[in-house]
Amino acid sequence: MASPADGRRFTVDVRPMGDAVVLALTGELDHDTAEPLSAALGAALTDGVPRLVVDFSELLFCDSTGLNVLLHSRLAVQEAGGALELAGLRRPVARMFHITGADEIFRVHPDVAHALAEQRPA
């Protein structure tokens, strides 16, 4: 999905990569835009993907709604025996994850390449 020139429209690009699926987020993730992420995470869980990596490198903003989608999805993925990891958090988004303590709950990588190079924890 292409985003408008202002870069604020939220999109999720789902990319299978080896044993993982990368969900690349673009724009702003908030109450009004969280459904596409929720749907993509749910579809990956239904498909039985063992490892999900959410790429934040092009995400400009994330509010508590987006965080809650990720937290609930993390639990569902773990219950199914998988892992949900984060990569490429930009400063404003990383700050929100740090303030809420969510950066201690998720496995966070500097970027997708690092995430995919590391083995999934047992």
Image (cartoon, rainbow, N blue to C red):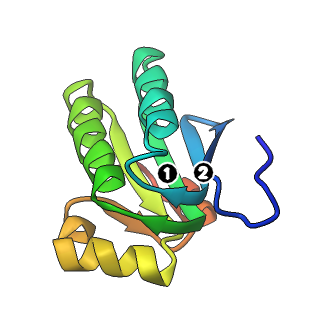
Q: In this view, does 32 lie to the left or right of 14?
A: left
Task: Give the residue number, with chain letter if any, for mark 2.
Answer: 10
Task: Give the residue number, with chain letter if any, for mark 1.
Answer: 54
Residue at 51% x, 31% y is 40
Viewer-side residue, 6 vs 112: 6
Image height check: is 80 above or below 104?
A: above
Image height check: is 65 above or below 79?
A: below
Residue 94 in picture, x, y percent from top left: 39, 77
Residue at 36% x, 45% y is 84
The answer to whether mark 1 and mark 2 are in CB contact below 8 A is no
Q: What SS does tag 1 mark?
A: strand
- Looking at this view, name the residue that lies furthest to the top: 46
Q: Quadrant of the N terminus?
A: top right
| Image disc number at residue 78 | none
Image height check: is 104 above or below 26?
A: below
Q: How crowded is mark 1: few (under 14 residues within 10 Å), some or many (20 or more)?
A: many
Distance, label 1 to label 2, CA atoms, is 14 Å
Residue at 45% x, 35% y is 35
- Amino acid type indicated by mark 2: Phe
- Amino acid type indicated by mark 1: Val
Residue 27, by quadrant, is: bottom right
Residue 14 visible: yes
Question: In this rendering, which labeled residue sits more in front, label 1 or label 2?
Answer: 2
Residue at 31% x, 75% y is 96
Q: In which quarter of the image is the C terminus?
A: top left
Q: In this view, does 105 lie to the left or right of 46?
A: left
